[in-house]
Amino acid sequence: MASQQVITVQPQFTVTPQVGEWQSGLMDCCSDCSVCLCGMCCYLCLGCQVAGDMGECCLCGASVPMRTLYRTKYRIPGSILRDVLTVGCCPMCSLCQLKRDIKRRKELGIFW
């Protein structure tokens, strides 16, 4: 009589998150015009969308701590000083980049 092999662990499918880089550049407005139009026409609304995506308070969406939190969560190189300069000098581009990155990671299934 042949013995039967019992399988106790099923193979799992995992997606390796893409970390270490932004999914789009700071000035890549043409890569997603809808996000940039939203940022131009209603900056506060886009900030609330970003905060909602990240599970944070609506007032935090366009802030330096939000950008820093996101960058460290996905191990994107940079520093707090660079985040301060980016948000301070180009707040709309910074917020749009954050939203495009979230949107792209959701499409890829690597947003957590």
Image (spheres, rainbow, N blue to C red):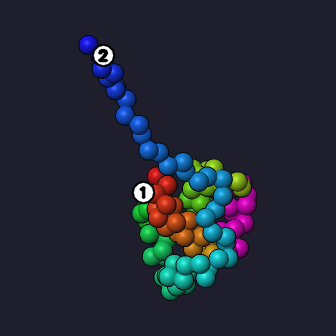
Residue 81 highlighted magenta (yes or no): yes
* Left or right for 104, reference 91: left
Q: Is residue 62 visible?
A: no
Q: Is residue 79 visible?
A: yes
* Left or right for 86, reference 100: right
Q: Which residues are magenta?
A: 79-90
How far apart are the alpha carbons under marks 1 and 2? 52 Å
Residue sitting nearer the eye, 57 or 10 = 10
Residue sitting nearer the eye, 6 or 33 = 6
The relative height of residue 34 versus residue 89 in the rendered view (above or below) is below
Dot 1 or dot 2: first in sequence order is 2
The residue at 66%/53% (across/down) is 20
Number of the label disc, if any, that sits on residue 3:
2
Tag 1: amino acid: Gly
Q: Mark 2: few, some, or many residues within 10 Å (few <14, many ≥20)? A: few
Residue sitting nearer the eye, 63 or 24 = 24
**Main SS category, magenta section:** helix
Give the structural element (helix, strand or loop) at label 2: loop
Q: Residue furthest left?
A: 1
